[in-house]
Image (spheres, rainbow, N blue to C red):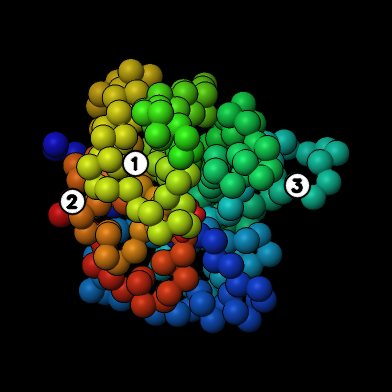
């Protein structure tokens, strides 16, 4: 299909336990990105406390994102981090809807939608994560679960803001399990998601939106995934913790 979707690689779960670890890791990543690295967008999603120091060592070579946000502007939300707070330190990207936030922290589609709207209102970009559980996958419900999560998550998002939206399809059964989805399974859900987006907006808009695959992506699986027409990048957890993986040729063929 003819499109101009620049591949996006999203990495997260930086996982360092200390600021020293975070900075060593971030500077290693920055130096792994050289002039010969393919021209793809890279966003590193970082725990709040390390955001500013990470930015200072990556030198603009990649975007630094936050792992989440509360959808409130101010008030009695002790412990919450607002969009204006992270925007003020220079964050470009924010994750929303990760399955761990949905499951462990009880975030609903309604709450995730409020986050998406707030992130976009603030002028930042959002990566909305969607994906079905193992039971849903086995019941052949992947497409319908993703359709619901997309429709609810993006409710009220204006068409003109969609150039700041990326979708990450992350089947829950594939996250951190080593069970990467086959390229064919991932492609079929990505195509379905693009159809849903075309129905919500229009085909041209849907063709522009980047849909990333996430779930046990490694150097061994990335090329076959990226060869699929509707897979526009990867959201990588575990494998992103190995600095040498950042120098890889993860480009769309
Ligand atoms: C994730 O946690 O969203 C993820 C994709 O992790 P992993 O790559 O380790 O499966």
Of residues 9 and 98, the one nearer the viewer is: 98
Of residues 174 and 243, the one nearer the viewer is: 174
* Mark 3 and mark 2: Cα distance apart in space: 39 Å
Is residue 146 at all visible to an observer of this figure? Answer: no
- Upstream in sequence: badge 2 or badge 1: 1
**Quadrant location of the N terminus in the rendered image:** top left
Residue at x 43%, y 74% (from the top left corner): 242
Percent x, y of residue 195: 29, 24
Image height check: is 43 above or below 211?
A: below
- Upstream in sequence: badge 3 or badge 2: 3
153 with respect to 2 (left or right)? right
Of residues 130 and 134, the one nearer the viewer is: 134
In the rendered image, the residue lying farthest to the top is 199
> Badges 3 and 2: C-beta atoms under 8 Å apart?
no
Crowding at mark 3 (Cα within 10 Å: few <14, some 14-19, many 20+): some
In front: label 3 or label 2:
2
Location of residue 119 by image quarter: top right
Crowding at mark 2 (Cα within 10 Å: few <14, some 14-19, many 20+): some
> Residue under circle 2?
227
Location of residue 143 by image quarter: top left
Q: Tell whether circle 3 marks a residue whose Cβ is less than 8 angstroms from ligand 1.
A: no
Image height check: is 218 above or below 23?
A: above
> Residue under circle 1?
211
> Residue under circle 3?
80
Image height check: is 125 above or below 42?
A: above
**Quadrant location of the C terminus in the rendered image:** bottom left
Percent x, y of residue 84: 67, 45
Q: Secondary structure at mark 2?
A: loop
Q: Secondary structure at mark 3?
A: loop
- Which numbered disc covers residue 59? none
- Upstream in sequence: badge 1 or badge 3: 3
245 with respect to 237 (left or right)? left
């Amino acid at each position: 299909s003819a499109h101009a979707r620049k591949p996006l690689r999203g990495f997260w779960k930086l996982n360092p336990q200390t600021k020293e670890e975070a900075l060593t890791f971030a500077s290693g990543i920055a130096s792994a990105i050289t002039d010969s690295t393919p021209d793809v967008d890279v966003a590193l999603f970082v725990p709040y406390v390390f955001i500013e120091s990470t930015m200072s060592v990556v030198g603009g070579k990649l975007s630094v994102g936050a792992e989440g946000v509360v959808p409130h502007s101010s008030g009695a939300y002790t412990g919450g981090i607002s969009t204006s707070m992270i925007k003020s330190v220079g964050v470009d990207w924010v994750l929303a809807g990760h399955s761990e936030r949905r499951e462990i922290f009880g975030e609903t589609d309604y709450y995730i939608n409020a986050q998406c709207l707030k992130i976009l209102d603030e002028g930042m970009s959002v990566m909305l994560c969607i994906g079905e559980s193992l039971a849903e996958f086995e019941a052949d419900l992947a497409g319908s679960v993703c359709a619901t999560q997309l429709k609810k998550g993006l409710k009220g998002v204006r068409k003109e803001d969609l150039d700041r939206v990326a979708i990450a399809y992350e089947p829950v059964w594939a996250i951190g399990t080593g069970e990467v989805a086959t390229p064919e399974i991932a492609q079929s859900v990505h195509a379905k998601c693009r159809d849903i987006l075309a129905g919500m907006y229009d085909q041209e808009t849907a063709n522009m939106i980047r849909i990333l695959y996430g779930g046990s992506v490694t150097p061994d699986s990335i090329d076959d995934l990226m060869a699929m027409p509707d897979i526009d990048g990867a959201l990588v957890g575990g494998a992103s913790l190995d600095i040498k993986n950042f120098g890889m040729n993860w480009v769309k063929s």
